Image (cartoon, helix red, strand yellow):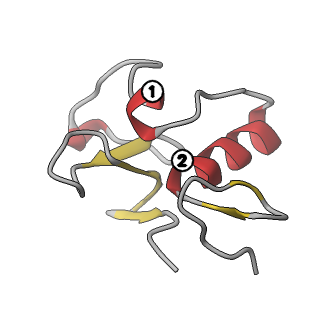
Amino acid sequence: GIRYKRGGNTPENGLDCSGFVRLVFKDAVGENLPRTAAEISRVGENIDQKDLRPGDLVFYNTLKRGFSHVGIYLGDNKFIHSPSA
């Protein structure tokens, strides 16, 4: 029920991919993550795809630059994200 908004950072005004991930992590574990997918990618550690566990973050190159999109791994080769309007 929350609309997509590029650069969106709040449920009231809309969320983009990193805004969505930030909201989930804040609500679930009280963790404040940086604003952008690229900045979030610098937090934590890199793992191999085969080692993914539910709750891990997955990053994608969607704008011809690395770490331009982020989602949350759910398990069973599925993830949740905020892709577009």
- Does 72 appear above or below 29? below
| Residue ID at (72%, 47%) | 23
Q: Nearer the viewer, residue 26 or 50?
A: 26
Residue found 72% across the figure and 27% down from its top: 31
Which secondary structure lies at badge 1?
helix
* Residue 12, position as x, y percentages in the image: 85, 64
Residue 11 placement: quadrant: bottom right
Instruction: Say which of 75 and 41 sits in front.
Output: 41
Q: Distance of mark 1 from mark 2, alpha carbons? A: 9 Å
Left or right: residue 36 compared with residue 20: left
Read off the residue under disc 1: 39
What SS does tag 2 mark? Answer: helix
Which residue is rendered at x = 54% and y = 44% of the image?
A: 55
Residue visible at 68% across and 76% down in the picture: 3
Q: Say whether residue 8 is left or right of residue 12.
A: left
- Please say if the residues under marks 1 and 2 sit with CB atoms less than 8 Å apart: yes
Circle on res. 26:
none
From the image, which quarter does the N terminus lie in?
bottom right
| Residue labelled with disc 2 | 18
Q: Is residue 53 above or below residue 30?
A: below
Disc 1 crowd, CA 10 A, few/some/many (<14, 14-19, 20+): few
Q: Which amino acid, by three-letter code, is at mark 2?
A: Ser
